[in-house]
Amino acid sequence: MQNGRGGLVLRGSWPVTRLRTESHRISLSPPLALALVKPTPRSLYNLLTRRLRRAFRHGRSAGDTQSTGRVQRKGALVASGSDGAIVSHAFDRHPILSASRLSLKLYSIVLFQQPGDLGTQFNTLNVVPDPQDILLINTLISERNTQLSILALQMANVDSAIQKLAAIRAKLEENSAHARQSLLAYRALTSPATRIPPEVLGEVFYHCLSKTPYITPRDVESPIVLTQVCRRWRAVAISTPRLWSSLSIYLQKADCEEYRRGCEAWLARAKSVPLAVRVLNDINMFAAESTVVSSVAHWLRPFITHSNDLWWHGPTIPTLFVSETETGTDLSLERLRITSHRDPPSIHFPGPAKGLRSASLRCLNHDLQSLDGIELPWDHLIELNMHFALFSSSLFVQLLTRCGHLHTLVISCLCADEDQLGVLRALSPGLITHPFLRRIEIKVIRAGLDAILNALTLPALEELDICFCYRERDMWPHAQFMEMVGRSRCPLRRLTVRSNKNALPYFGEYMETIPELTISTSAPDHDPLSRLVFR
């Protein structure tokens, strides 16, 4: 009987029957089940059908009408016995019909025979068997042992099949990973990112840099990480000078030739773009030999010569900025920052540095009473920041006379002894005039602020920020401040007085005198009026 899918359905039972293929001998015994995993060629399909029909006729004569057999050419051959057991097995790989170029994968057929009904009349321990029953019981025991051996063998076959399937699955997963990688590679070829012009891509790379002005080279950060993506990105990154115009240099590593070559190659990629260099002098200057220091200074000098932004941290080297034979070299430096924890800065510019506009000196463990050892192009500076433990008030006045083009001046901490106070109070009112100074920020301690304000005329002053170290002790120089403002006729827009509540009663008068003035104040954090703004 043929089903709707082209398969043959047989009903009946059959005894042991043998099927032969080109290289397989198949034994059929009820109850049984067969499966062909791959589609069956017509020749093998016809062969199995003939064998099953013969078995069907033989089984029909035995009167068994419970067993059924099915042959599906595009699915599997399935047979079930009267006990309802269904089992399957696969043929080994076997090529058939090579003329039709079909590679048939047959899996060897294994017959699974499920034990029959295990229930007997001896399923209770309350029965005492007689000698004739004992013979029957021994037969059943032997049968069960045989069945257990067969089942153990079948389970071993299943375990072996599972291991093979696991190996096949691992291979398939590996192939899938390779295919996925290939897919991503082909997709990348058609990505819009590959069509971005190099100039635009270089601009994108520039915005990927760290927000810090000085870059410490690391493999996981830009710009180095950009050179590890693909060949095109590497070429664009290396040919974009702005990506390589910033660098942090550690002098303790500078005695290593490989480190020097790396720094030189880094900054060479910047080409003609101005450099921003931070130098950390972590060398023990007291223990280091003079030849080592001289060699480091000679190696650094080309970098500093082509830098427009330099931050030097640590003890300075006197011959750093220019050598004895290069006194005529014009530095391109525009911004200079020097910080130190212990030693006072020592700066010498014997050659011209006409481009220097901003200078910042910071050494919080040193009292600055003189400018000896600090030679800067003072008259070219527009912005000056000087932070020391103590800063002489008379030196503050001296800076105003030297730096004739300053726009911003930040000083801390202003102080004055009795002799300096006497010199300051001897200055005539308005003696020192600075036509360009727009912003002053100072921190004062025993500064003689009244004498300083009395000596100043600042016609361009727009912002004044004064912080007092002692909130209660220092008085606010109200009269000198009003005289300085009236004498200067300055466009003062903002006045900030920090940690001095003695100035509060005068704020109303200041706002009446200068209507456009904004006044703010700050006090210690425990004060409920920690910050006030008056408009």
Image (spheres, helix red, strand yellow):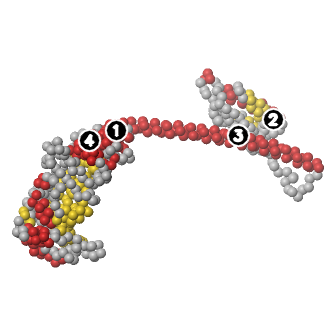
Tell me: residue 227, above or below residue 519.
above
- Residue at far right of view: 131
Q: Residue at x 65, y 41 (%)?
A: 162
Q: Amino acid at mark 3?
A: Asn
Q: Report the mark closest to the observer, 1 or 3.
A: 1
Compare marks 2 and 4 and give the one earlier in the sequence: 2
In this view, the mark in front (1 or 4) = 4
Q: Quadrant of the C terminus?
A: bottom left
Question: Residue 430, labelled with which disc?
Answer: none
Which numbered mark, 1 or 2, is in the foreground of this view? Answer: 1
Q: Quadrant of the N terminus?
A: top right
Residue matched to label 1: 234
Residue at 53% across / 39% down in the picture? 174
The residues tagged by marks 1 and 2 sit, at their Cα atoms, a distance apart of: 76 Å
For label 4, the SS is loop
The percent coordinates of residue 214 (x first, y second) are 28, 50
Badges 1 and 3: C-beta atoms under 8 Å apart? no
- Contact, CB < 8 Å: mark 1 with mark 2? no
- Describe the element under mark 1 as helix, strand or loop: helix
Give the residue pinned by disc 2: 15
Query: Is 99 in front, or is 526?
Result: 526
Which of the marked residues, 1 or 4, is nearer the chain's N terminus?
1
Of labels 2 and 3, earlier in sequence is 2
User: Is 74 above or below relative to 140?
Assistant: above
Are the residues flagged by discs 3 and 4 in contact, CB closer than 8 Å? no
